Image (cartoon, rainbow, N blue to C red):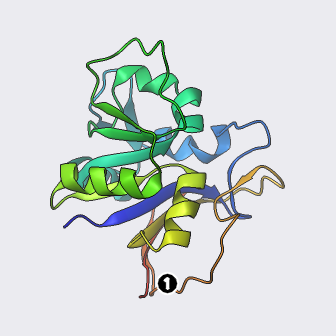
Amino acid sequence: MADVIANMSMSLDGFVADSEDRIDHLFEWFGNGDVEVPTAVEWATFKTSEASAKMLRDALENVGALIAGRHLFDLTQGWGGRHPMGAPVFVVTHEAPADWPHPDAPLTFVTDGVESAVEQAKKVAGDKTVAVASTKIAQQCLNLGLLDGIQVDLIPVLLGSGVRFFDGLDTMTKLGDPEVTEGHGVTHLSYRIKR
């Protein structure tokens, strides 16, 4: 069965976006190297260090489904109907958009909660990973005990304020020792959640 892993690029002081929801400084590592990593969409090819490229290629191969919140969906305009990972996306929302221009996109609007989104995503992902790519959804998954791991792309910047990755947690969560990959302008940390 699929592992459910939350993944975000995060500043050293714990923010995944600034106070205006911008991610510019946190996503610079996607273009600061000379190794090209094509994605599932024409508009997104990454250029990273070899270490980061290896991690990205692994994610592109092994992510079988993504879960996002409605806020991220709206910010990205639904990725134009196809997420760069190329995997089906499950958007947790109170209400599906009435005017979604890509009805045939591999995107499902889940209106009955996070647990349902995780269950649906795991069925689609099979033995591949389910990636959680929204802070509030990741927090809900942590509170419900639905996450198997956390991956942080740690960026050497202090934003001072903004959207925190780990706000709103109801419980303490213990993590195993990290797997660490050093890239250019980013340190990739991967933790298993201890049960």
In the rendered view, does 92 fall on the left or right side of 165? left
In the rendered view, does 73 fall on the left or right side of 168? left
Reading the image, the residue beneath label 1 is 175
Q: Quick one: SS at disc 1?
A: loop
In the rendered view, does 141 fall on the left or right side of 109? right
Q: How many marks?
A: 1
Q: Nearer the viewer, residue 46 or 171?
A: 171
Residue 118 placement: quadrant: bottom left
Residue 21 placement: quadrant: top right
The quadrant the N terminus occupies is bottom left
Residue 70 placement: quadrant: top right
Q: Amino acid at mark 1?
A: Leu
The quadrant the C terminus occupies is bottom left
Seen as rendered, the residue at the extreme right is 160
* Residue 92 image position (x, y, % from top left): 47, 43
* Residue 180 image position (x, y, % from top left): 44, 74
* Residue 96 image position (x, y, % from top left): 47, 27
Q: Residue at x 70, y 63 (%)?
A: 14
| Above/below status of 143 relative to 126 | below
Q: Residue at x 52, y 38 (%)?
A: 93
* Residue 18 image position (x, y, % from top left): 75, 44
| Above/below status of 130 relative to 67 | below
Within 10 Å of the Cα at label 1, are there few (<14), some (14-19), or many (20+) other Cα atoms?
some
Q: Residue at x 45, y 87 (%)?
A: 177
Q: Nearer the viewer, residue 58 or 123?
A: 123
